[in-house]
Image (cartoon, rainbow, N blue to C red):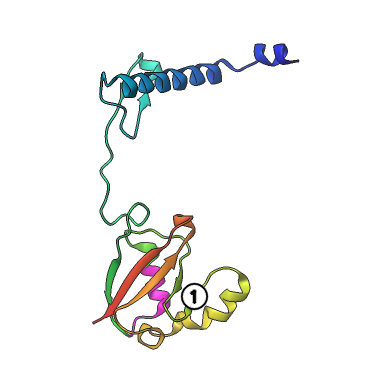
Amino acid sequence: LPWGVVKNIIPAVASTNAIVSAVCVNEAIKVLSFCSQSLNTYMMYMGSAGIYSHTFVYDQKETCPVCTTHTHRLSLQGSTTLNALLQKLCDGELRLKSPSVTSSTKTLYMRKPVALEKATRQNLDKPLKELFSSGEELTITDPVFHDTSLSVIVTFE
């Protein structure tokens, strides 16, 4: 059985495994011998154009919600509704999908589970000044963040 499986491996998979193995060994040699700078964050192999690899360093955005602990600040009218705030988080530079919001004292809106969504839905049409005070830190969770959350301080104009 194993011999039959080995003979039927798709050549592309075997080639990819060989390339990845070669890059790993090459990087290990560079790290152990200090003969060259090691790969930094990204490698692209261009197989159809020959053996060519290009490496570059990604710049870290200081306001990135995933890789930094930056607290975002928003200045809004006190009469802005919670729904408008959520829409701003979805449409703005953060591009959230379905955010949930909690303050330090209470849950403002939770999308899941359904029971919590029903209980907090009434807050969507309320003005922000009725839900929390100006300068209070809100915690935003979203499926985009997976295991982390976003801190936003909202001040009223």
> Where 36 falls versus 108 (above or below)?
above
**Relative to 67, is 118 on the left or the right?**
right
Q: Residue furthest bottom?
A: 130
Q: Residue furthest left?
A: 157
| Amino acid bearing label 1 | Tyr
Occupied quadrant, residue 7: top right
Image location of residue 9, percent across then percent down: 62, 17
Q: Residue furthest front?
A: 32
Q: Which residue is mark 1?
A: 109
Residue drawn at x 27%, y 69% is: 73
**Relative to 92, is 144 on the left or the right?**
right
Q: Does 84 appear in magenta?
A: yes
Tell me the SS state at disc 1: strand
Residue drawn at x 38%, y 63% is: 150
**Relative to 74, is 8 on the left or the right?**
right
**Relative to 119, is 49 on the left or the right?**
left
Image location of residue 50, percent across then percent down: 36, 13
Quadrant containing the C terminus in the rendered view:
bottom left
Residue drawn at x 51%, y 83% is: 122
Quadrant containing the N terminus in the rendered view:
top right
Occupied quadrant, residue 125: bottom left
Q: Does 81 appear in magenta?
A: yes
Q: Which residues are magenta?
A: 79-88
Image location of residue 37, percent across then percent down: 26, 25
17 and 96: which one is in front?
17
> Where 14 falls versus 144 (above or below)?
above
126 and 2: which one is in front?
2
Q: Residues within 10 Å of mark 1 (few under 14, many from 20)?
A: many
